[in-house]
């Protein structure tokens, strides 16, 4: 049973518009959440994170929202750029237990 | 340059033939870990190590071994590979206490077991 779910395998967005990537989790012990970005033939790179004591964290064009009661988080990218096209992984931590979601492939169309 | 280096990048092997995938980091990180990435499943943690001679199982440790004799190296050992271990493998390292936000990943090793 997957503890971290990303129910959209892919997403296409027009350049300049907002991209919203969603992530759901089942383990209420998770206390730290991260988003990673992965280009083909490269390892994942860290993008942004949020602690469970917050509901929003912003870094430039990237904002992560956390809804603990719904066990849901989302990554907003605005405005989206073609270079944002990649696979995005949501991840959650509970101590040293670190769990990735299956990923969402984002395509930003020029 | 800070980096995590995995070797080999690509490997095709036969069932039962022992193999080792090496992982080395040059950042003096305490924490190192191995993941496998499979379609629809994302990255799953195989083993992790919090420091030299300290290793622990992740979510999918069956069929794998690791060792941490030196801080910089964390090899992944498949004693008797099977086709279900065909996957894309990533090694990562990070300082302890940073929650993986400062994690560096290697470029991956694509393993095929026939």
Image (cartoon, coloured by chain):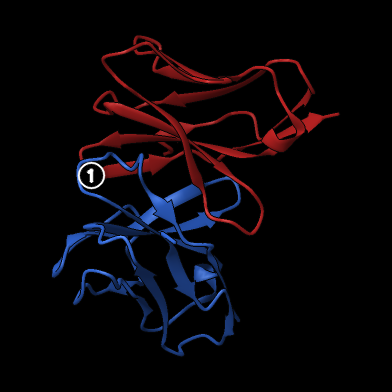
Q: Residue at x 58, y 80 (%)?
A: B11
> Residue B34: which quarter of the image?
bottom left
Q: Is residue B97 above or below residue A82?
A: below
- Viewport quadrant of the N terminus of chain A: top left
Q: Secondary structure at mark 1?
A: loop
Which residue occupies the extreme left position in the image? B53
Percent position of residue A32, x then y: 30, 28
- Viewport quadrant of the C terminus of chain A: top right
Q: Residue at x 65, y 17 (%)?
A: A78
Chain B shade: blue
- Residue designated by label 1: A96
Q: Is residue A27 above or below residue A16?
A: below
Q: Is residue A74 above or below residue B35?
A: above
Which residue occupies the extreme bottom position in the image? B17
Chain A shade: red
Percent position of residue B66, x then y: 28, 72
Q: Residue at x 31, y 13 (%)?
A: A54
Q: Considering depth in this image, is A38 or A73 the residue closer to the camera?
A: A38
């Amino acid at each position: 049973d997957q503890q971290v779910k990303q129910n959209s395998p892919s997403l296409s967005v027009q350049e300049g518009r907002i991209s919203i990537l969603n992530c759901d989790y089942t383990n209420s012990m998770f206390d730290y959440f991260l988003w990673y970005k992965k280009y083909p033939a490269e390892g994942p790179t860290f993008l942004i994170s949020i602690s469970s004591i917050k509901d929003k964290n912003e870094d430039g064009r990237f904002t992560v929202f956390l809804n603990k009661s719904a066990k849901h988080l989302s990554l907003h990218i605005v405005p989206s750029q073609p270079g944002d096209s990649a696979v995005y992984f949501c991840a959650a931590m509970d101590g040293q237990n670190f769990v990735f979601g299956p990923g969402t492939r984002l395509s930003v169309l020029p | 340059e800070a980096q995590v280096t995995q070797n080999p990048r690509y490997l095709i092997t036969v069932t039962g033939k022992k193999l080792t995938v090496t992982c080395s980091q040059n950042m003096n990180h305490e924490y190192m870990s191995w993941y496998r990435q499979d379609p629809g499943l994302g990255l799953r943690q195989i083993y992790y190590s919090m420091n030299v001679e300290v290793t622990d199982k992740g979510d999918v440790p069956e069929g794998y071994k690791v060792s941490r004799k030196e801080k910089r190296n964390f090899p992944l050992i498949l004693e008797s590979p099977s086709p279900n271990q065909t996957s894309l493998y990533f090694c990562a390292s990070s300082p302890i206490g940073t929650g993986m936000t400062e994690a560096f990943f290697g470029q991956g090793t694509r393993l095929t077991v026939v």
